[in-house]
Amino acid sequence: MIEAMTLSKRFGSIQAARDVSFVARDGEITGLLGANGAGKSTCLRMLYGVLTPDGGKACIDGIDIRGETSQARAHLGVLPHAAGLYNNLTARENIRYFGSLHGMAAQRLKSRTAELSLALGMDEFIERRAKGLSQGQRIKVALARALVHDPGNVVLDEPTNGLDVMAIRNLREMLLALKGQGRCVLFSSHVMQEVAALCDRVVIIGRGKVLADATVQEIRERSGTATLEEAFLQVLGDTEGVS
Amino acid sequence: MRTLLVVFCKEFLENLRDRRTLLSALLFGPLFGPILFGIMVSRMLEQSVVESDVPLKMTISGSKYAPGLTQYLKARGVSLIEKDLSENEARAAVRGGRSQVVLLVPADYPQLFTAAKPAPVLLFADSSDSQTRKLADRARGILSAYGSSIAQLRLEMRGVSPLLSLPVAVNEVDVATPTGRAVVVLGLMTYFVLFALLMGGLYLAIDSTAGERERGSLEALLSLPVARSALVGGKVLATCAYMCISLALSLTAFVCVFRFVPLERVGMSANLGFETALIFFAICLPFVPLGATLMTLVASFTRTYREAQTYLTTVLLVPTLPIAFASIYSLKTKSSLMFIPSLSQHLLMTSVLKDEPILLPDILVSAAASLGLALLLFILTARHWRRESMLG
């Protein structure tokens, strides 16, 4: 479970997040929806502890990310915005590097990599250098890297960016599989269809504030519009930035 | 500690597979210096040998007016080409490069010579050309020797002791030992050694910081449950390892080059065997962490590979500054200078080359100063990595 409690963050004169509160529950996929620059990444970065909030607090499975960073992070897998790989390492070595940094033993790391390789369909390229992998293959490796320590919570920042239709479909299946395993999945996106197709709950962010926090169904009912798109636009109050 | 090791192994392996790192760390860095150096020194030696061995070629015009002088020149091994030139023709011959040195004896030479008055001769040479300037110097030397021998004869004929015209007898005593003389040449070598050392870690320092940021793997790395100082430590350690390899290769290459450079032929002996190379390695070793932390720190502030490259090539020049100062003010090994990294290494290595005794406290101070500064830079780097702005 991931909890954001009145998180605030200011960069110079820009208030990137103000009193952001929401809960992402286990066994659910929570979507963080907002236009470019709405503050999605800032919120996620505070959740996985690379940014310190000016106010408020973030907990992973009840553990404060600022107070006990290491313990909290052990429960958390992160796929940041630009999840680059080490091009001169093979897919397996990329995964192993992160596993080792999580303090995993060699034996456990090996079996876990085999597990992930099977689940994500990476067997054919697991021994290849990351340099030659396709975008879809890279995202699989990056996801495996984020999941190597078997975390109960997964945070993904715009994971579908730059992927083709097939790769997006694959990713969707992977996220649903994670949900099926009872994990808490939180991902950000500015693409509505993506959120509508996947999420149990949606948190809409605009100008650093939470504008709505409900199920897709609830949002639609509350706004009284037929399509999700219209509902979103109504919640956002403007027509900019959401595709 | 485990984190440090994991990061070290990964950076070491990853860069071992990178052609650019390998070229700079294991080929260009360590070999550039020794090879350039070898070529330079051999060329210098060749020239100095050639100059004294090859007879001086001189074009002479009007030799019939000065048979004595012509005889003298021939006796001194000058190969004379006799031609009949006017003053303008002689000027044009030198300017056009047809002759390098032309001696013109005017028609009034015999008359003035027999009257014991200064008899003029014209020596044509181009002083802007370093090659002919040297020839002209040799010609001038021979002519003045002829002049003073004639002067002595004239004094003797008049019953005056020629010794009267020598009020001071200057005897030069050159105290430079053969090794000491070589140091002038070898002084440059210490810079090449430090250059190779830094060059070895250059690309790793960039790749593990700016490279990590540029390819987008940094944020994932920073969101792991590991201490940032351990991450930086591993990266710095890997940079150190490459610097050590580069340093070792460079010293080995120098030892090999000096096997083939005939320094003894001009009375210099290079005190550079494998034993000296080992001592050099030990002297430079404390400079390795300093170079590695400095490069990592600078590269940590940059956003892209290219930017890092720009700044770090400037860092490559940093160790030259103290060495340049040392040669401008011709600084000698002094204990107080041991506090300055790169200069202290330079001075210690020079002392070893000159066969001078080096003091143990000096070595310790030099090492402590470098390591202390390295520690300070490491703390600064680790602190920077803990800041939010690291994300970029």
Image (cartoon, grey):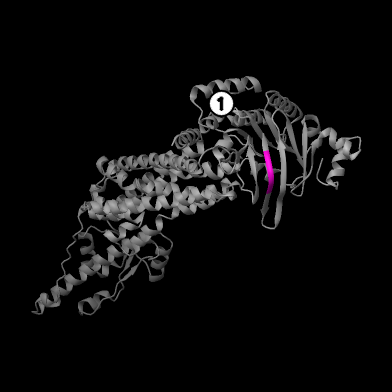
Is A107 displayed left or right of B340 in the figure?
A: right
* Residue positioned 71% across, 50% down in the render: A16
Q: Which residue is mark 1?
A: A92
Is B253 displayed left or right of A149 in the figure?
A: left
Q: Position of residue B243 (x, y in %)?
A: 41, 42
Q: Which quadrant of the view contains residue B5?
A: top left
Q: Position of residue A62 (x, y in %)?
A: 63, 36
Say if the magenta span includes residue A5.
yes
Q: Position of residue A191 (x, y in %)?
A: 79, 37
Any part of residue A86 in sight: no
Say if the magenta span includes residue A74.
no
Crowding near the residue tagged with mark 1, few <14, some 14–19, many ≥20 C-alpha atoms within 10 Å? many
Q: Which residues are magenta?
A: A3-7
Picture quarter with the N terminus of chain B: top left
Most frequent secondary structure within the magenta stretch: strand
SS class of the residue under badge 1?
helix
Is A3 displayed left or right of B52 in the figure?
A: right
**Nearer-the-camera pick, B304 or B237:** B237
Is A96 displayed left or right of A163 in the figure?
A: left
Seen as rendered, the residue at the extreme front is: A62
* Residue positioned 36% across, 59% down in the render: B131
Tell me the subunit letter for badge 1.
Answer: A
* Residue positioned 55% across, 32% down in the render: A98
Q: Give above or below for B380 relative to A23.
A: below
Q: Position of residue B31 (x, y in %)?
A: 40, 42
**Nearer-the-camera pick, B196 or B387:** B387
Any part of residue B222 in sight: yes
* Figure label count: 1
**Nearer-the-camera pick, A71 or B168:** A71
Residue type at tag 1: Arg
